[in-house]
Amino acid sequence: MASVFSKIISREIPGYIIAEDDRFIAFLDVFPLVIGHALVVPKKEIDYLYDLEDKDLGDINVFAKKIAIALKKAIPCKRIGVAVIGLEVPHAHIHLVPMQNVGDINFSKPKIKVSEATMIETLQKIQSFL
């Protein structure tokens, strides 16, 4: 069964897609910890990030770096936090989270609700820095 991320990749369901190439895609998390919380995902459906081949693991991090740089320019923050959790969706992914403090990347706290207008505005702002 295709993961929710595979359905975004194939456009079966909508996503706020920041950027993509032939192997990777980045999009805004619709259940974010903070505004601008993004996910970087391999298009190949594989459950765990560290099950990726070495080249793919290196390349996804280079792809994520480009997204993180644009994200930091778009969202005022001290750092872009990086996390690999992988428990909720069985498809490898990297979380990029704009942070003012360490609490901003606490996955046990409730997710925030963000309006569609804010999601679109955030998406466009991030894309403007790519």
Image: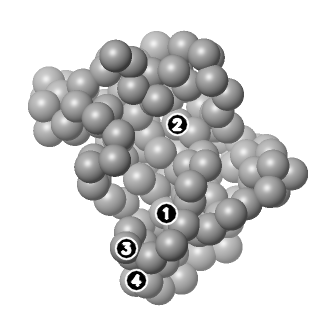
x 55%, y 25%: residue: 8
40 relative to 31, above or below: above
Residue type at mark 2 is Ala
Check disc 4 and report the residue beneath it: 102
Q: Position of residue 128 (x, y in %)?
A: 76, 44
Q: Residues within 10 Å of mark 2 (few under 14, many from 20)?
A: many
Mark 2 or mark 3, earlier in chain? 2
Residue 86 as seen in the image, left or right of residue 23: left
Q: Is residue 74 shown above or below 13?
A: below
Separation of residues labelled 3 and 1 (CA atoms): 14 Å
Colour setup of the view: one colour
- Marks 3/1 in contact by CB < 8 Å: the verdict is no
Alpha carbons under labels 4 and 2: distance apart: 23 Å
Task: Please indicate whether residue 61 sits to the left or right of residue 101 in the image.
Answer: left
**Residue of label 1:** 97
- Residue ID for mark 3: 108
N-terminal label among 4 and 2: 2
Towards the viewer: 127 or 113 = 113
